[in-house]
Amino acid sequence: QVQLVESGGGAVQTGGSLRLSCATSGRTFSMLGLGWFRQAPGKGRGFVGAVSRTGLNTYYQDSVKGRFTISRDNAKNTVYLQMNSLKPEDTAVYYCAAVSKGEYCSGYACYSNALQYDYWGQGTQVTVSS
């Protein structure tokens, strides 16, 4: 079992920044591939970005490239999502998720697929006002 707890959400104005954190427990952190997804009201859950278990590879959905950065701190068992230049269309509940067999997930096609993720956090709300 893997437990994931997100924090850092809130309300900001357009152009502002937020950093989301996702603390994990229950399994060796370095074995986990980790991703961020989001769900806006009335829409399905969509991929935001991910980081491989080694931390060497990151993947981003096109709309957030250049604005969002994912990083992981293996010493703190935590993954981060730094969000800059926020736009109203970034408003959503953001979810952290983990691929338990990270060694078998490789490339954008795998990490962007929500079905690859075994564990999910409870979500944190991000609201961007114009």
Image (cartoon, helix red, strand yellow):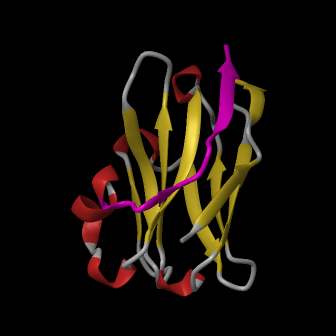
Q: Quadrant of residue 73?
A: bottom right
Residue 43 in view here? yes
Tag count in the figure?
A: 0
Q: Which residue is drawn at the image coordinates 62% and 33% (left, top)?
A: 86
- Where residue 123 appears, as percent x and y from the top left, is 62, 42
Q: Quadrant of residue 103?
A: bottom left
Q: Which residue is drawn at the image coordinates 48% and 77% (left, top)?
A: 32
Classify the position of the N terminus by image quarter: bottom right
Q: Which residue is drawn at the image coordinates 65% and 43% (left, top)?
A: 84
- Where residue 28 appears, as percent x and y from the top left, is 57, 86
Answer above or below: position of 104 versus 115. Answer: below
- Queried whether the magenta region covers residue 9, the answer comes back as no
Residue 113 in view here? no
Answer above or below: position of 11 versus 66. Answer: above
Residue 41 left/right relative to 122: left
- Where residue 104 appears, as percent x and y from the top left, is 27, 80
Residue extending farthest front: 1
Q: Which residue is drawn at the image coordinates 73% and 85% (left, top)?
A: 75
Q: Please give the range of residues in magenta.
A: 116-130
Answer above or below: position of 81 versus 44. Answer: below
Residue 78 left/right relative to 117: right
